[in-house]
Amino acid sequence: MDIFTAIVQILDSTIRLSVPLLLACLAGLYSERAGVFDIGLEGKMLVGAFAGAAAASVLHSALLGLGTAILISVAFALIHGFASITHRGNQIVSGVAINFIAAGSTIMLGQHWFQQGGRTPALAPGERFEAITWPGVDAVRGVPIIGPIYSELISGHSILVYIAFLMVPFTWWVLFRTRFGLRLRAVGENPAAVDTAGISVAWLRYRALICTGILTGVAGAYLSMVQNGGFVKDMTAGKGYIALAALIFAKWKPVNAMFACLLFGFLDALSIRLQGTPLPVIGKVPVQFMQALPYVLTVILLAGFIGKAIPPRAGGVPYVKER
Amino acid sequence: MAQAAIELIGINKSFGAVRANRDINLEIVRGTIHGIVGENGAGKSTLMSILYGFYQADSGEIRVGGQPASIKTPNDAIALGIGMVHQHFMLVDNFSVLENVILGAESDALLKKSIAKARSELERLEREYGLEVDPDAIIEELPVGLQQRVEILKALYRGAEILILDEPTGVLTPAEADHLFRILKQLKEQGKTVVLITHKLREIMAITDTVSVMRQGTMVATRETKKTTVEELAELMVGRRVLLRVEKGEAEAGGVKLAVKNLTVKDSRGVTMVDDVSFDLRAGEIVGIAGVAGNGQSELLEAISGIRHAVSGSVMLDGKPIDLTGKADPGELRDRGLAHVPEDRHHVGLVLAFEENENSILGYHDDPRYLKGPLLDIDAIRNDAKDKITKYDIRPADCRLKTANFSGGNQQKIVLAREMEQDPGVLIVGQPTRGVDVGAIEFIHKRLIAMRDQGKAVLVVSVELDEIRSLSDRILVMFAGRIVGERGPEASEGELGLLMAGVEQREAAE
């Protein structure tokens, strides 16, 4: 196998691996831009993944599965909102609680309903999102360079992959070109300014959290209905936290977020690719080391290479009218 | 007959036990500049927040343009043509001027049209009122004077006919303030109504048509500016309180205990709060610092007690300097004989969740008297607390009670007892009797004078002029961060009031 094919394959899996990160990262972007820290991205993805796979296998419909994933994930986002917006609770504690509830309840309900050790039944073809083959793939496959790029990289992904990448310009447009986006950014910087302008701070933050819930729901559905043919316990495996890291790395900007997630996805793809392959100079590296590589690099990147990341100024602070 | 733009009738508002506004009646005439003066905490801002729908009055009626109005949210106020320029600007710092102006008043779900509309509207306002500001500038890169202009533009963009400005000159340079006043006069000429909240009498005299005075939550008087004087306003503002005089002999001042030299303190925004202040405090005397609240007394106290960073100057305690970086070790200062009763006892002086006896040794808990080896000697601490409770008549007399359950006056006594009983060489007291009942005031005053007679140096900062006059052997008056005069205790209330209002003696004579 030549180098070029290898690169195309790594890039192809980079795309597939970065999609859940990207969706979760954009989800976090909505809530954090509105001033609500959300460490519960992980949990919301997990319940989304479970609800999606469970509903799809019972209802025999990928679309109904996706809808259920979004619904349940939004419900969890609203719980976070109820605790941290309405009752001004600590946002980190609320987020951590959601992660625990998600991890426990998915296994418990999965076992109760399907008796497969916390898994959901393997999804049949109609119950998953299938890869979409773009027109003309067969015609260009033979063409050097362009052929493999078109047929492997661009074509042949599920609809959710394209949605994820379209969400990047869409999110940018919402944030910077719409009234909702202006208010959302304002409430994350100075909620008092929003309040005195006659806008409800709480309702605005709730709407931001609903956006977060929708996107984490899609991210979860991607994990269980595209990447995998069913739900497996703890299948998010820390992706929600990596997405948060990517969000900081991206300085809370949508386009940066895409590149950050692609980078993390690339590291992940590389580590899978290099498992068991002897490296030049170093020689054979233990599998565990390669698996740890993305996380090690995350720490290094976050610690040293992002420069000054200024979070939304009102982030993490429940809004209380001043006396 | 001039028409009323706003009428407030019988407004009441309480925050917990604090009655911020009681039975306020006020009429503001259309097309005038109406000043509202009062000390900090007199209830001016609360009243205006009620008018702007930020708070709800507990009772009372608001009429706008003669019609009864229900103002439940700022939106209601904006719809009635009321705009507000807050003391702390309500701007999003990393937004442009345009974005701030349209926030909440967008004409469309997409921003493009709103921004275009705001841009042309800002040009019009600029022409009409001379409110120049670059619409694309980012707020945090603008000087405060321009940020304030953006606040005014925000209100006008929303069609405000009545503009409320809350302490607008607090953060402005004199030149910026002059410019603001020109803008306000222009607004008035165009038929707008302006309400100016301030504690600076000079501004009131310079620009208003009518002035109302608030004191301790009540509206004490409304005057035509032309027909009143700074003296009258100062007196109304500070008020004549029941005179409490404690018998005391002549002070026998000894050597200098505390020497403050050229002390300058800035707040977090970089505004100078204490401006080149120098004075000496001698053994056996009480020096009182008088002033309208908010003129730098708090910052001065904090700097001297080592808990606030001073930009320049020095403070010598018994000839040795105090660390003015704001990181001084309070324990070390206590060991050197400096005791401090902070103004804000809830946040600085006490841990409200602790029992009374724990608070009564707080800060002195390393003293061997309260220790048994490495452990606290609980019996010694409780006996000590009981002694203080008896001596200072702290009620209820229960040293195991949680401090939060004591009344404000008794909490103050707990702090005073703790600091005074340590027998310090220098005692610094902020607002010694704030929230304390009359009986306790007399007791606290007697204790302070007894300390003086024992040869201690006492520095008292209070906004109660009577208290300052009753206690002090020397009175220093602070205004706008500077010490503007030193008087003996025989100085008249009027004389001190003028100094506190920042009016120079010779100006008043004119």
Image: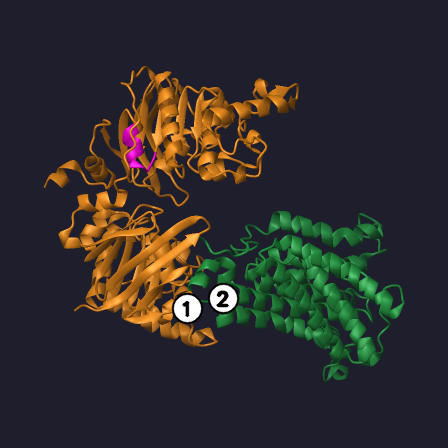
Q: From mark 2 to mark 1, how far is it between C-alphas?
A: 10 Å
Question: In what quadrant of the picture does the N terminus of chain A appear?
Answer: bottom right
Q: Residue at x 38, y 19 (%)?
A: B456
Give the quadrant of residue B225: bottom left
Is B467 magenta? The answer is yes
The segment highlighted magenta reads B462-470
Tag 1: Cα neighbours inside 10 Å, few (<14), some, or many (≥20)?
many
Residue B55 seen anywhere in this rendered image of the structure: yes
Q: In the figure, B173 relative to B449: above or below?
A: below
Give the quadrant of residue B6: bottom left
Q: In the rendered structure, which amino acid carries the disc numbered 1?
A: Asn
Is A277 magenta? The answer is no
For mark 2, give the secondary structure: loop
Chain label for disc 2: A
> Chain coloured orange: which letter?
B
Q: In the figure, A192 relative to B294: above or below?
A: below
Chain A colour?
green
> Which mark is drawn over residue B347?
none
Is the magenta region chiefly helix, strand or loop? helix
Q: Position of residue B168 (x, y in %)?
A: 31, 53
Chain label for disc 1: B
For mark 1, give the secondary structure: helix
Q: Residue at x 51, y 68 (%)?
A: A181
Q: Which residue is mark 2?
A: A200
Q: Which residue is mark 1?
A: B75
